[in-house]
Image (cartoon, rainbow, N blue to C red):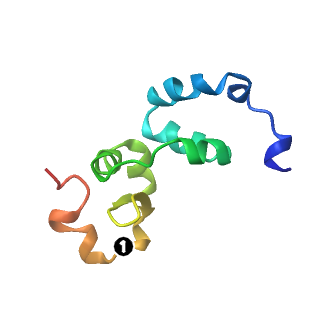
Amino acid sequence: MSESNISFPIMKLPVKLHAPIVDNLGFQEDIMLKMTGRHFWNTIEPLSHAELLQAEETAYARCRTLFACKDCLRLRPSIKFADRMKTGKRSPGAHG
């Protein structure tokens, strides 16, 4: 099913209302909304590295073993990181 065939209730709202709604979402909701289609993928700003570091501490990221990548500014699975990057001062929760 193509994106144009899917109807999301939020898309029935005027576009000028999308920004205030997005501003009140948490990172998990931002990510989920971005994945609904091109409009929100292009509209929602990527998380900053500082926000990603905070996101590492959430239950969502911990149960999925996600780490913040400072290069691509995304939460990535632990398998994408070298062992030395997952321990010590670079490990989740060790940043100040």
Along the viewing direction, whichever of 96 and 5 lies nearer the viewer: 5
- Is residue 81 placed above or below 33 in the rendered structure? below
Q: Residue at x 74, y 24 (%)?
A: 12
- Is residue 65 placed above or below 22 in the rendered structure? below
Could you say where residue 70 lies in the image, as x and y percent from the top left? 32, 63
Q: Dot 1 corresponds to which residue?
A: 81
Q: Residue at x 22, y 52 (%)?
A: 93
Q: Residue at x 27, y 68 (%)?
A: 86
- Element assignment for label 1: loop
Amino acid under disc 1: Phe
Along the viewing direction, whichever of 14 and 40 lies nearer the viewer: 14
Farthest residue to the front: give it. Answer: 16
Could you say where residue 56 lies in the image, as x and y percent from the top left? 33, 50
Q: Residues within 10 Å of mark 1 (few under 14, many from 20)?
A: some
Q: Is residue 73 left or right of residue 35?
A: left
- Is residue 90 placed above or below 83 in the rendered structure? above
Could you say where residue 72 lies in the image, as x and y percent from the top left? 41, 64
Q: Residue at x 71, y 29 (%)?
A: 11
Could you say where residue 79 lies in the image, as x and y percent from the top left? 43, 72
Total numbered labels placed on residues in the image: 1
Q: Is residue 64 left or right of residue 6?
A: left
